Amino acid sequence: MDGLPRNSNKGSSVVNKVCNTVHKVIKNQSKPHFDCVESARRPVPHNEEIPVPVCTTLPDVSMLEVEEIEDQYSNSSESEYKGIQSTPQQFSQEELNDLIRDLGLSKQTSQLLASVKR
């Protein structure tokens, strides 16, 4: 292979040394800290020294802005939501056979599915 005799354990001992070295390096690395990210901070118990923050002002959103935003999204001609059909979908025998095959159903389960879908 790489110049080592077939029965030599030198290759595996080299691999073990490399793996152990890599393991030690990874183990000794410090974990990253994300203290500057608001959502990464741990919860702080509030007391007299650390009061609960109070929201003093709310953003001013007029109804006109809300209507403009709604109009912007409601003007699209294609609806993302298709809705529920009130009538059951009919399958042809061929479509039903394909569905049974694709799902890998047993004979008993396929008969149950066929009775429900008809």
Image (cartoon, helix red, strand yellow):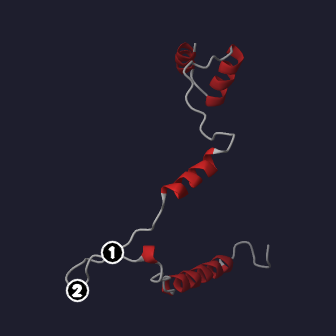
Establish if 97 lies above or below 6.
above
Query: Callout 1: 10 Å neighbours few (<14), some, many (20+)?
Result: few
* Residue shown at 48% from the left, 82% from the top: 31
Quadrant holding the N terminus? bottom right
Percent x, y for residue 15?
A: 64, 78
Q: Secondary structure at mark 1?
A: loop
Percent x, y for residue 25?
A: 55, 86
Percent x, y for residue 47?
A: 21, 80
* Residue shown at 64% from the left, 76% from the top: 12
Q: How many marks?
A: 2
Q: Which mark is residue 115?
A: none
Q: Which residue is mark 1?
A: 43
Residue sitting nearer the eye, 51 or 57 = 57
Q: Which residue is mark 2?
A: 49
Residue sitting nearer the eye, 81 or 62 = 62
Establish if 100 lies above or below 69.
above
In-image side of 108 versus 99 (left or right):
left
